[in-house]
Image (cartoon, rainbow, N blue to C red):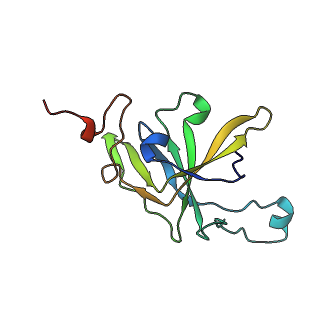
């Protein structure tokens, strides 16, 4: 069976980020590449638009605490939305240090080859929205059973 190039697979948030995700920076527009010649000619960069949905693309960089390799600890998630998504409030963990735990809605993953010199399997991660982890389903740790499978003591 052949899977067509560009196939996007639906995935649950806790499947992609089993220990959750922490947002780094702000939500930013995903801009098209501009060559030096284009910049010299005074052309304006345009925001990318998803070819399937027609929605604007926004980039959100998150830290994945469950990453096994250093290169996988920082992940860019592309959020497809007509307007700029508003992330949840930051949480202060100690004076002067804030983190922004996030959950993504409508996640899809698309396999692709990554790397310049040394190639490896990677994924383009897309979402349709950003939510607070408290309003989304709580992530399960390995070994946890869904409540429907747990027996009353």
The residue lying at 58 percent from left, 35 percent from top is 72
In-image side of 75 versus 101 (left or right): right
The residue lying at 40 percent from left, 48 percent from top is 100
Q: Which residue is nearer to you in this view: 86 or 17?
A: 17
Q: Where is residue 108 shown, x and y percent of the image?
A: 54, 52
Up-down relation of residue 21 to residue 38 (above or below): above
Looking at this view, name the residue that lies furthest to the left: 153
The residue lying at 83 percent from left, 66 percent from top is 38
Looking at this view, name the residue that lies furthest to the front: 1
In the rendered image, the quadrant that contains the C terminus is top left
Q: Quadrant of residue 131?
A: bottom left
Q: Which residue is nearer to you in this view: 56 or 107?
A: 107
Q: Quadrant of residue 73?
A: top right
Looking at this view, name the residue that lies furthest to the right: 37
In the rendered image, the quadrant that contains the N terminus is top right
Up-down relation of residue 134 to residue 46 (above or below): above
Up-down relation of residue 22 to residue 50 (above or below): above
Q: Which residue is nearer to you in this view: 56 or 122?
A: 122
Instruction: Give the total of numbered labels.
Output: 0
Q: Where is residue 137 shown, x and y percent of the image?
A: 34, 48
Q: Which residue is nearer to you in this view: 38 or 106?
A: 106
The residue lying at 56 percent from left, 43 percent from top is 75
In-image side of 2 versus 128 (left or right): right
Q: Where is residue 105 shown, x and y percent of the image?
A: 44, 56
């Amino acid at each position: 069976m052949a899977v067509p190039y560009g196939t996007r697979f639906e995935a649950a948030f806790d499947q992609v980020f089993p220990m959750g995700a922490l947002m780094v920076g702000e939500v930013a527009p995903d801009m098209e590449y501009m060559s030096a010649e284009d910049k010299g000619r005074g052309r304006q960069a345009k925001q990318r638009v998803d070819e399937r949905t027609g929605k604007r693309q926004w980039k959100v960089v998150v830290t994945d605490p469950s990453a096994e390799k250093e290169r996988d600890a920082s992940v860019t998630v592309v959020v497809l939305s007509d307007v700029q998504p508003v992330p949840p409030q930051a949480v202060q963990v100690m004076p002067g240090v804030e983190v922004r735990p996030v959950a993504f809605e409508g996640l899809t993953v698309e396999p692709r080859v990554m790397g310049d010199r040394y190639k490896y399997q990677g994924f383009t991660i897309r979402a349709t929205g950003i939510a607070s982890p408290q309003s989304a389903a709580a992530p399960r740790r390995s070994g946890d059973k869904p409540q429907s499978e747990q027996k009353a003591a």
